[in-house]
Image (cartoon, rainbow, N blue to C red):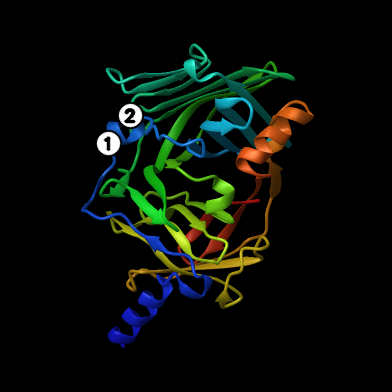
Amino acid sequence: MIKLQKIVLALLCLTSFGISAVNYPVGEVRKTNAADFFRHPQKSDKYNEMWSYVFVLDNGAKIYVNYTWMYVPTQGFKIGTDFSVWNFKGKSHSVGRQYPTDRFVEDKNTNSISINRGDYLMEKAPGVGHRVLFSADKNGKKFLDLTFTSAVDGMVQGDGISKVDGANFALFVHVPYGRVKGRLGIGNDTIEVQGYGYMDHAWQNEKPAEMAARTVTLCMPSSKSFIAGRIGITKNGQPFGYAIHRSENSSGIVYANAVLEDGKKYSPKKFPKNLTFAWHDSTVAPLKFEAKANETFSILSNFDGFLERNAVKLSLGDLLYKRGRSTTEMGKLDWVIAGF
């Protein structure tokens, strides 16, 4: 049986017959650190880097924040900031802004990143005390100021860099789970909030639309046992990225070696009705969930004007996010499925 499993895994890595090749990082599994948190500049106009947060509040609202260093055709590199909230007093809101790269300032003495002179912050290294600030006034004020009051350690293997069809993809799951507390504001309505949060950070030297047909972010509202991470799926259905599995106060990294829909290999040509992730570690039970979305969100809705939207579409693709919560054998799962 073990020999058969090794043969199947080897076949999954073959590049022939149109199957994507994925090589995971080498080296020891370790905790993420402040050096991982800062930008990893690459000499490529396909390079992009993103710091992403998911916050699920005790009042039922969900918040998504992304800070992105991206290449926009005809415009060069830009900094993108986007924020969306679902179910803030029964309504949803979003905003996105773009800035020149000189508005992105790293301070390695304080382990902080500031954008547009402090309108957007990632303050202190990810972990307890890490603060996220988003403040924009565009079609109405949008404000978020949250701090992690607890945090499970982030983990990564080696330098975090995987090879996906020859391109580099790096992922750092900095905060798989942590409690957060702070303020959320829409217009002049600002309230005190608390809940849990997830944070990861990825860079790649290939356009997202070329590397992944779908990307799935997973997080769970428990610090005792959970699966949390980001799994990309190539156009040929090959998974890459990783998740952190926590059980009985011990954590480890798991890689997906199969992605299924209705018990068959998932075809990422369309958004799924359900998904099952089978892990390379056979001691970790497969994660199965129904992918019925609470909302569908287009990143292009945060860009003004026809020319700007099409420039971003050329760079990143027409990126859609489907977001929801499902019940699994491990408990509640909050997920985001992104695709082009």
Contact between labelled residues 2 and 1, with CB atoms less than 8 Å apart: yes
Determine whether the residue tagged by mark 1 lies in a helix, strand or loop.
Answer: loop
**Residue 138 in sight from this viewpoint:** yes
- From the top left corner, tell me how far across and down residue 94 is, in percent: 68, 31
102 left or right of 94 in image: left
- From the top left corner, tell me how far across and down residue 315 is, in percent: 61, 38
Q: Please identify the quarter of the rendering in which residue 190 is found.
A: top right
Callout 1 amino acid: Asn
Q: Please identify the quarter of the rendering in which residue 84 is found.
A: top right
Residue visible at 28% across and 32% down?
35
Above or below: residue 102 compared with residue 260 = above
Q: Name the residue tied to disc 1.
A: 33
- From the top left corner, tell me how far across and down residue 104 is, in percent: 46, 19
- For the view shown, which residue lies furthest in the right direction? 306
Quadrant of the image for the N terminus?
bottom left
Above or below: residue 297 compared with residue 99 = below
Nearest the eye: 35 or 204: 204
Above or below: residue 158 compared with residue 237 = above
124 left or right of 274 in image: left
Q: Name the residue tied to disc 2.
A: 125
Cα–Cα gap, marks 1 and 2: 7 Å
Mark 1 or mark 2: whose residue is earlier in sequence: 1
Determine whether the residue tagged by mark 2 lies in a helix, strand or loop.
Answer: loop
